[in-house]
Image: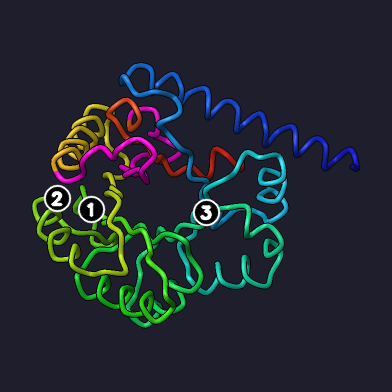
């Protein structure tokens, strides 16, 4: 491997080990076992060469993308196609109904369901494909007009409406926190997210598929894990 590639690999693995050490420490502070927290690598803006390095090193097992067509090209026929079978691919962006078919075809999980309409569309296409798709409900804990998600007080209602959809498997909540919030405000938001998660999703039996509270990004994942999140979404600090 050329020197430049070795240097980049070293930098990426240093990032990965620093992040996972911080996650482990935050999990210990929250009472979670380290193995209960999984890292979702946000690969949407990362160079494919960097993603490839981390997958081949065994560092990335879960990857998140937010644009259906871009992910379809990148992972389906593009530079990461040969590694597609080695990751669980999550959709973490806003899903439009006209992209539901392609999303159901492309992704293993859809983490950003925010309406019954979208849930029904994904369910319909999943049924046609003969598959059941694990999904998460996106909950909006901020007042930004540019971000999507359902209000916390409506999350349980949407979950109840989704339960009869036989080709979806609801597995948790993805939370969108306020941008630029103080640590105290973030802690309050993450605590509220954990409260509704615990209310609506029971702890699975040993050996059964897990449920996830997806909170925290590169700037606040330690606070999220301390509050009980078990699926932080990290991109920029991993690929720095």
Query: Is 104 inside the magenta-drawn segment?
Result: no
Question: Is mark 1 in CB contact (under 8 Å) with mark 3?
Answer: no
Between marks 2 and 1, how big is the CA–CA gap? 6 Å
CA gap between label 2 and label 3 equals 27 Å
Magenta residues, dominant SS class: loop
Q: Position of residue 230 (x, y in %)?
A: 37, 36
- Give neighbour class at mark 2: few <14, some 14-19, many 20+ (Cα, 10 Å): some
**Which residue is identified by label 1?**
139
- Residue for badge 2: 152
In the rendered view of the protein, which quadrant contains the C terminus?
A: top right
Numbered badge on residue 88:
3
Give the number of callouts.
3
Mark 1–mark 3 distance (CA, rounded to whole Å): 22 Å
Q: Determine contact: label 2, label 1, CB under 8 Å.
A: yes
Q: Residue at x 38, y 34 (%)?
A: 220
Query: Which badge, 2 or 1, is on the more N-terminal residue?
Result: 1
The answer to whether the residues at label 2 and label 3 have Cβ atoms under 8 Å apart is: no
Mark 2 element type: helix
Q: Nearer the viewer, residue 57 or 164?
A: 164
- Relative to 95, say whether 179 is above or below: above
Q: Looking at the rendering, which quadrant does residue 229 occupy?
A: top left
What colour-coding does the image apply?
Answer: rainbow
Residue interval drawn in magenta: 200-223
Whether 59 is drawn above or below 90: the answer is above
First in residue order: circle 1 vs circle 3: 3
The mark lying in front, picked from 2 and 3, is 3
| Residue furthest right as drawn | 2
């Amino acid at each position: 491997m050329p020197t430049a590639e070795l240097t980049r690999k070293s930098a990426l693995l240093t990032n990965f080990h620093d992040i996972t050490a911080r996650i482990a420490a935050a999990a210990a502070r929250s009472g979670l076992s380290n193995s209960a927290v999984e890292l979702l690598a946000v690969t949407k803006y990362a160079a494919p060469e960097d993603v490839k390095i981390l997958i081949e090193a065994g560092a990335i097992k879960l990857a998140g993308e937010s644009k259906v067509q871009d992910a379809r090209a990148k992972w389906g026929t593009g530079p990461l196609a040969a590694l597609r079978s080695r990751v669980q691919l999550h959709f973490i962006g806003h899903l439009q109904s006209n992209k539901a078919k392609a999303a159901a075809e492309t992704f293993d999980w859809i983490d950003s369901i925010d309406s019954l309409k979208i849930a029904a569309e994904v369910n319909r296409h999943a049924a046609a494909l003969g598959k059941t798709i694990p999904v998460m409900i996106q909950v909006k804990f901020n007042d930004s007009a540019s971000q999507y998600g359902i209000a916390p007080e409506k999350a349980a209602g949407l979950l109840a409406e989704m339960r009869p959809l036989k080709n979806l498997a609801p597995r948790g909540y993805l939370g969108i926190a306020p941008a630029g919030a103080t640590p105290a405000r973030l802690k309050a938001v993450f605590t509220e997210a954990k409260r509704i998660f615990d209310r609506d999703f029971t702890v699975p039996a040993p050996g059964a598929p897990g449920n996830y509270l997806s909170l925290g990004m590169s700037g606040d994942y330690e606070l999220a894990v301390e509050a009980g999140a078990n699926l932080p979404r990290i991109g920029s600090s991993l690929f720095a």
